[in-house]
Amino acid sequence: MDRIKVLLVDDQALLRLGFRMIVGHEADMEVVGEAPDGRVAVTMAGTTRPDVVLMDVRMPVMDGIAATAELLAAHPEVKVIILTTFDLDEYVVQGLRAGASGFLLKDTPPADLVAAIRTVHGGQAFLAPEATRRLLDVCVPALPAPDGAQPDAHAAALATLTDRENAVLAELAAGLSNREIGAKLYIAEGTVKIHVGRILAKLGLRDRVQAVILAYEAGVVRPGAA
């Protein structure tokens, strides 16, 4: 069985040690490298070829947002999980826009950390509904207002969605899980999953995280909508 290769990026050696112990304890994972800043991380990604990168937001030399964008531009197959604290939420949203597949708090339980790694490695975003709501209610208002051209740029893509898909997108972006969306729209959870897949395909999005950001930028949902 091929193990999931993980690159740890944080300027605090003690935190890297903690993450190394957690990841190294899993039979299906291995730590292939550690970087103290974003610049080193970008270089190491080319030599270690990680599957998943745990990326701190605030670091010297190059921060996690810039590093995520540069790393994914060179290695789009890599999955990045942003590591943060809630008082840095605005950086998290920027990181997600840069292509990260999710985010975690630095004090997240070990079980959630390894679950997140497995989830993004499998091609899914790791962003709990509660975190989605927080992005909308707390993080998004802290960001600069979206470019006025963005809603128009998204309009053509959104026009390809059916009425049902638009309804599912609005609820997804408001932070509801597939089960909650199904209950609200009176459709099966499996049907919701199918709709979500079609929405992502039509909009050219990689995961639910990107759908939340697009929905905000296009005005589909507003902070506090959840």
Image (cartoon, rainbow, N blue to C red):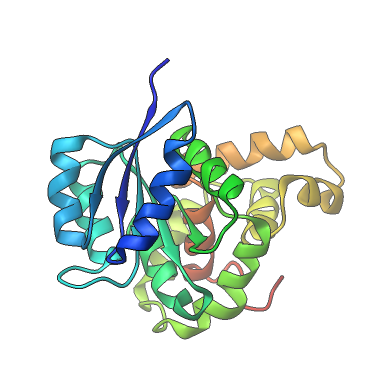
> Going by the image, does 41 lie left or right of 160?
left
Query: Quick one: 143 or 171, which is closer to the camera?
Result: 143
Direction top: furthest residue = 1
Considering only vertical position in the picture, is 36 above or below 112?
below
Residue positioned 26% across, 71% down in the render: 59
Residue positioned 49% across, 81% down in the render: 87
Where does the N terminus fall, quadrant-wise?
top left
Query: Quick one: 7 or 169, which is closer to the camera?
Result: 7
Query: Quick one: 191 or 35, which is closer to the camera?
Result: 35
- Whether residue 158 is visible: yes
> Going by the image, does 220 lie left or right of 36?
right
What percent of the width, then of the height, locates residue 56?
A: 35, 63
What percent of the width, then of the height, locates residue 107?
A: 54, 63
What percent of the width, then of the height, locates residue 62?
A: 18, 68
Where does the C terminus fall, quadrant-wise?
bottom right
> Going by the image, does 177 lie left or right of 148?
right
Residue positioned 57% across, 37% down in the render: 197
- Whether residue 206 is visible: no
